[in-house]
Image (spheres, rainbow, N blue to C red):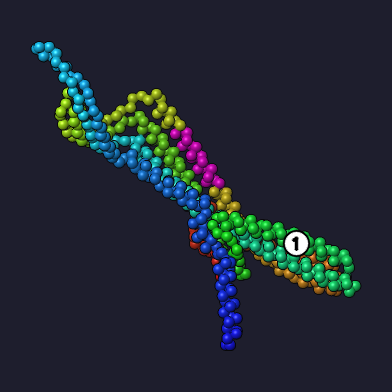
Amino acid sequence: MTALPFRRLLTSLLCLAALGQSHPASALGLLPAYEAALANDPAYRAALQESEAGQEYRVLGRSHLLPSLTANYSTSKNQGDVTTATLLGERTEPRKYTSSAASIQLRQPLLHLEGMARYRQGEAQSSASDAQFLVRSQDLIVRLVSLYASAKYAEDQLAQAIAQRDAYAEQRQSNVRLFQRGEGTRTEVLETQAKFDLSEAQVLEARDSLTNARNALAAMVGQDIDRLDPLVDDFQVRPLQPASFEAWKELALANNPEVIAQRYAVEVASEEINKNRAGHWPRLDLIASVSNSKSDTTSTFNQDTNNRSIGVQLNVPLYAGGSVSAATRQAVANHEKARADLDAKTSQVLVELRKQYNLTQSSVLRIDAAAKSLSSALLLVDATQKSVKGGQRTNLDVLNAQQQLFEARRDLALSRYNYLLGYLRLRYSAGTLARADLQDVAGYFVREN
């Protein structure tokens, strides 16, 4: 290799490196987008903090059954007069002294029905929080793929619009040449020009749609979007597993986190009833204390007293103005409402599950029909162009055939993206959506560097 070509090669590599630093060329893949969304999506970060807060319900509930320890200390300066009766009459003695008192008390519930209800309620509330966080985690995957597919579809639409505009531009040049040679008509030139002008507007609209779609995805992943991985050419629909709707229904009833969260809500409402009913029951506590007092009163002036005690305390509620009964009736009504909400949520989940199941089942037919339509549109364009040369078709027929071709490509891309979304939404409705499903969907995209 001579010195000049080597220098040119080195210069080219340096330029490419500088370009790569200022404008990253790698496309954003679906899995990297998911990792970025885990760190940057505001809705997911809020759900994460909500979940952490929800875990504290267990601690709060358990605290009502554990011992409590309190310490007290007080000190004061006192001034008083002590009058004493004697044989010679009364004698008054002024006193100025400092008194202090300190104590530590331990209280351990022995019989505390309200505390037991609060403990079980805290467990249910934390479990409901876990289920709600699982809902948000699965929703993150669905939202991400939806935004990713929308942005990628917008990229496809822009590319199709540009290709359509370029095809019309080429057709227009051909019409102008034919017209100049006297083999075409001005009408054909005007027809193509009208299609070209319309395609220019469609390109502008497609660019705006792409910008909006990328901005929506960027807000979720926390980074600017330049390019996305395209779909694979060999797009194969996988068989649905399990195949029957009844199997999916069983999965949804057992695993859907929204249904599970609502079941825990019913349990929380049930423990609310027990908590309020406990207002009629006695409470028994074990109490142990250690105290020290110095000159606590005038009668204990200059005395230092240490005291240790252990015993039980029984509190028996007698009457609270009817608040306990009213709160219990209110809790019973709320419990019935929670059960009705559970039935409503279950029905809603099963309706959505049926919808996504049907859409996924029909995706094979829709994709196959769109692929056949695209093949037919390609053949139609070729046949129409040949027919024009034979005088059997007109320029408008060619333009219409090209328009049909671009629509067929659009429909095929849209049906593929809808299949991928339906694939995930079906699993989301069943409550089984996980990262492995996202990896399966990511396999439908070509990873670009």
Q: Nearer the viewer, residue 169 or 153?
A: 169
Q: Position of residue 255 (x, y in %)?
A: 47, 52
Q: Which residue is mark 1?
A: 200
- The residue at the point 36 percent across, 41 percent down is 61
Main secondary structure type of the part rendered in magenta: helix
SS under mark 1: helix
| Residue 239 seen by the camera | yes
The segment highlighted magenta reads 331-348
| Residue 369 seen by the camera | no
Q: Quadrant of the C terminus?
A: bottom right
- The residue at the point 38 percent across, 35 percent down is 275
Q: Is residue 52 left or right of residue 243?
A: left
Q: Position of residue 295 (x, y in %)?
A: 18, 28
Q: Is residue 342 magenta?
A: yes
Q: Is residue 290 magenta?
A: no
- The residue at the point 43 percent across, 30 percent down is 327
Q: Position of residue 192 (x, y in %)?
A: 81, 65
